Amino acid sequence: MSAIRRKFGDDYQVVNTGQGSSFPAPAKRKRQRFVEKNGRCNVQHGNLGGETSRYLSDLFTTLVDLKWRWNLLIFLLTYTVAWLIMASMWWVIAYIRGDLGRGHDDSYTPCVANVYNFPSAFLFFIETEATIGYGYRYITEKCPEGIILFLFQSLLGSIVDAFLIGCMFIKMSQPKKRAETLMFSQDAVISQRDGKLCLMFRVGNLRNSHMVSAQIRCKLIKSRQTPEGEFLPLDQRELDVGFGTGADQLFLVSPLTICHEINPKSPFFDLSQRSLMSEQFEIVVILEGIVETTGMTCQARTSYTEDEVLWGHRFLPVMSLEEGFFRVDYSQFHSTFEVPTPPYSVKEQEETSCLPSPAPPLTPTPGDPRISRRERIFSLDGVPQEEPPSRLPSKLQRMSSRNGKEALKAGGGPAAQQASEKASSTGDLPLRVQHLGSFASPEEPVGNQQLQLKPLKVGSDAQTQSAGELEHHRLTLLPPPIPGPNLNPLPVAGGRPEDNLPAKLRRMNVDR
C-alpha cells in the first residue's frame, strides 16, 4: 500500500484490491439482471404452442444446445435401442427359418451359424457392428434375407455413429469454454481521460494463444418511454467504444482498458454522480474473436449494472517491465483507485461553459490604465475624442509648417509631394502629433492655397492625419463663446490664422 501511495500520491485510495485490502467494497444491491456476470442470458422462452416442432426441424443444433447430461442420456439410449432392435431382427429371422432348434445339428445350414437364442443374436449384432469378428458366429450364403439385413445394419450404424459422434465432438469443441479464459473487470469506472469524461472497463486474456480479429461492442439495456407514450422495456442502445476510429478492434495480448467517451451523442450525456444513484440500467459487453488454435469464433459476455459503475475511479496499472519481457499482475486486475473527478454531468459542464461573461463597458474611463493612448483618442465607433489643444504658439506652428513645405519642395518635387499627400490621407493616427500649417506659395495663385500637413517624428514613426479630419477636429476643439468683452479673440473657421494674430506678431510675420 505504501508503494502505491508513493507512486500515485497520498490523495489516491485503492479499493477492491482483494482480501488484503483495508477498504472493503460497498455492499451491492441485488437486482434482476438481463445478462449474468458469466455471460449467460437470463431469459426463458415460454408458451411456444405449436412452434415446438421447429426444434425438431433442426435436430442437430437442438442436440448440441442441450446440456451435457441430456446429451449423454440420448447418446446411450440411441445406441442401446439400435442394438436391441437390430438384435431382435436377427432373432426373428432365425426364429422364422427354424434355426433356433437346429443349432447343434451339423448337417443343417442355418442363416447365422451358432445363433440359438436372443442373447446369441445380440452378440452377433454387436460383433458385426463393432467389426470385432471373433469368427464363431457368421452369416451363410443360403440366407438372402440375412444379407439384406446385414447391409441395412451397416448403413444404419454408420449414420448413427456419424450423427451422435459428430454431435458429441461439436459439443466438446465448442468455443464457449475458451471464453472462460477471457476476463472482464468486476466494476466499470467513470473518470476523466484526456480532459473528457469517459466510462471505462478492463478486459484481459489469460492464455498465450491470441484472439484473432478481436472486436468489442457495448449495449445499454434500459427501459424508456417514447414521446408518443409507448413503453419500451429493456430497450437496447449502442455505446460507442471507438467504432469510428477503429479502437474497437483489439490486439488482446495484455489487459486493455476500453473507453466510451461521454459526449452529446452518448446516452450518459446527462448522467451525474448524484443521478447515478437513482438510475437503473445495465451495460452489456460483448467480446468476439477467432480462436487461434481451432479457427472457431468465440464470444464472451458480461454486464455492469448501475451499482457496479464507480464514479471518480481509475484502474490500477498491472503491467511492469522485467528483464527481457513484460509482466502482467492479474492480482490487481480488478483494483481501482480514486481520482479527482467533477461530480457534474457533461451536459451541465457544457451549459456552465456556455454562459455569457459580463461585457466590458463600451465607454472607457479616462483614468483607466489598461486603455491605451490610441484607444483614448479614438472611441469604439471610430469618432475621434477631444484632446487639449497644442501648447505651441501660433508663430512656432507657422514656422514648423513653413519649414516642412520647404523641405518637401527640396526633397523631390511633385513626386515627393504626391507621396506626402498620400501619406497624409490615412486619417488614423493621433491628432496631437500633427500640426496644421497654412501657407501661400508665391508661384501659385491665391485660390489654390491649401491646408497642408506637417508630419512630425515621435519616437521613430511618422504619424499623419487627413486634412478633413483635422478640420473636423479643429472645429470640435473650439470652446463656446464666453459672454462679455472678447479679450482673446479666436480664429474664425475658414479664415487664415495670420489674420487673427496681434499686430506685433503680424508685422514680424510680414518681415519674414
Image (cartoon, grey):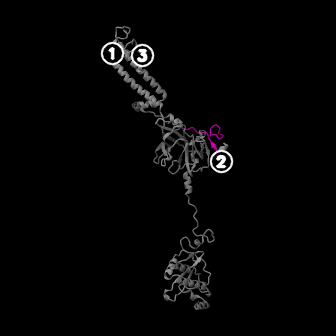
Q: Residue 9 carries which label?
A: 2
Cα gap from disc 3 to disc 2, whole angstroms: 80 Å
Give the percent coordinates (x, y) of residue 132.
42, 19
In magenta, the rendered stretch is 5-32
Residue 132 higher or lower than 346, as above or below: above
Q: Which of marks 3 and 2 is in front?
A: 3
Is residue 363 or residue 48 the one in the foreground?
363
Cα gap from disc 3 to disc 1, whole angstroms: 19 Å
Residue flagged by tag 2: what amino acid is it? Gly
Residue 270 higher or lower than 399, as above or below: above
Evaluate if marks 2 and 1 touch, with contact meaning CB atoms under 8 Å apart.
no
Q: Which residue is drawn at 34% across and 18% down?
A: 147
Evaluate if marks 3 and 1 touch, with contact meaning CB atoms under 8 Å apart.
no
Quarter of the C terminus within the rendering: bottom right
The residue furthest right is 2
Of mark 3 and mark 1, the one earlier in the sequence is 3
Residue 373 showing in the rendered view: yes
Circle 3 residue? 134
Q: Residue at x 54, y 52 (%)?
A: 347
Disc 1 crowd rating (10 Å Cα; few below 14, some 14-19, many 20+) is few
Circle 1 residue? 141
Evaluate if marks 3 and 2 touch, with contact meaning CB atoms under 8 Å apart.
no
Cα gap from disc 2 to disc 1, whole angstroms: 93 Å
Horizontal arrangement in the rendering, residue 276 relative to residue 96 (left or right): right
Specify the quadrant of the image occupied by residue 85: top left
